Image (spheres, grey):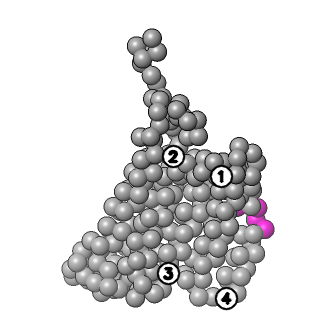
């Protein structure tokens, strides 16, 4: 529908549009063929694999655990399967993996915390823009930040910059990166819909 020039429509509205927009770009570049359909899910699978391994490394700093996780992830096959079919799940999984990677890195490297939390928010927004199934996992970084900061026992809970999980970042700022930014990015995924020429349900008068 996105590539149907002059007659584009919002179809299949049970899912948000980002993954469909990316698949459409792949088809526009490589054609309406198996490569065009699958190039974006394939790239998403590669990104999800790399980001997942990096997330575990930053969370554990255990080389053996990271290597074993990489082997299990590669041989478990769900990621492999979604990387070779034209479905939305691969894009969602890649975005969630990037969010986990950046959040874990922000916790492990507080000096990079601000821009990594910002990337976490962008990735969460992309995951929501790919598929609404991401909602439960999208809340995990924000909830984790709140619980960790509350357990740190700071008197000025909202404005303190001290304590886990990312020293130097207040709870208010974390809410911006992990709460507001994802919603803004999610909303932005709908912008191409305004370029579609035909409405989903045209009025009878418009057809006369």
Residue stretch in magenta: 75-79
Q: Is residue 113 magenta?
A: no
Q: Nearer the N terminus, badge 4 or badge 2?
A: 2
The residue under label 4 is 63
Mark 2 or mark 3: name the one nearer the start of the chain.
2
Residue furthest to the top: 208
Real-space CA distance between mark 2 and mark 3, rounded to the nearest whole angstrom: 29 Å
Q: Which residue is mark 2?
A: 17
Residue position for label 3:
105
Q: Are marks 2 and 3 in contact (CB under 8 Å)?
A: no
Above or below 56: residue 130: above
Q: Position of residue 28 (x, y in %)?
A: 63, 48
Tell me the CA gap for discs 2 and 1: 18 Å
Q: Where is 161 relative to 21, above or below?
A: below
User: Would residue 78 be counted in the magenta stretch?
Assistant: yes
Q: On screen, 207 above or below 157?
A: above
Looking at the image, is mark 4 or mark 3 earlier in the sequence?
4
């Amino acid at each position: 529908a996105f590539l149907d020039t002059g007659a584009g429509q919002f179809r299949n509205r049970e899912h948000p549009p980002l993954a469909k927009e990316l698949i459409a770009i792949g088809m526009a570049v490589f054609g309406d063929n198996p490569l065009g359909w699958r190039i974006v899910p394939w790239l998403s699978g590669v990104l999800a694999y790399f980001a997942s391994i990096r997330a575990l490394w930053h969370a554990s700093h255990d080389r053996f655990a990271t290597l074993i996780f990489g082997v299990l992830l590669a041989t478990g096959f769900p990621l492999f399967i979604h990387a070779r079919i034209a479905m939305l799940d691969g894009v969602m999984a890649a975005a969630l993996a990037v969010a986990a990677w950046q959040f874990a890195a922000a916790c492990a490297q507080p000096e990079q915390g601000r821009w990594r939390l910002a990337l976490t928010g962008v990735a969460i927004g992309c995951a929501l823009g790919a598929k609404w199934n991401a909602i439960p996992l999208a809340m995990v970084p924000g909830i984790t930040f709140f619980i960790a900061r509350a357990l740190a026992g700071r008197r000025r809970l909202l404005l303190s910059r001290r304590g886990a999980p990312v020293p130097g970042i207040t709870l208010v700022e974390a809410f911006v990166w992990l709460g507001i930014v994802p919603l803004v990015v999610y909303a932005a995924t709908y912008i191409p819909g305004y370029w579609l020429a035909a409405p989903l349900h045209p009025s009878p008068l418009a057809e006369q």
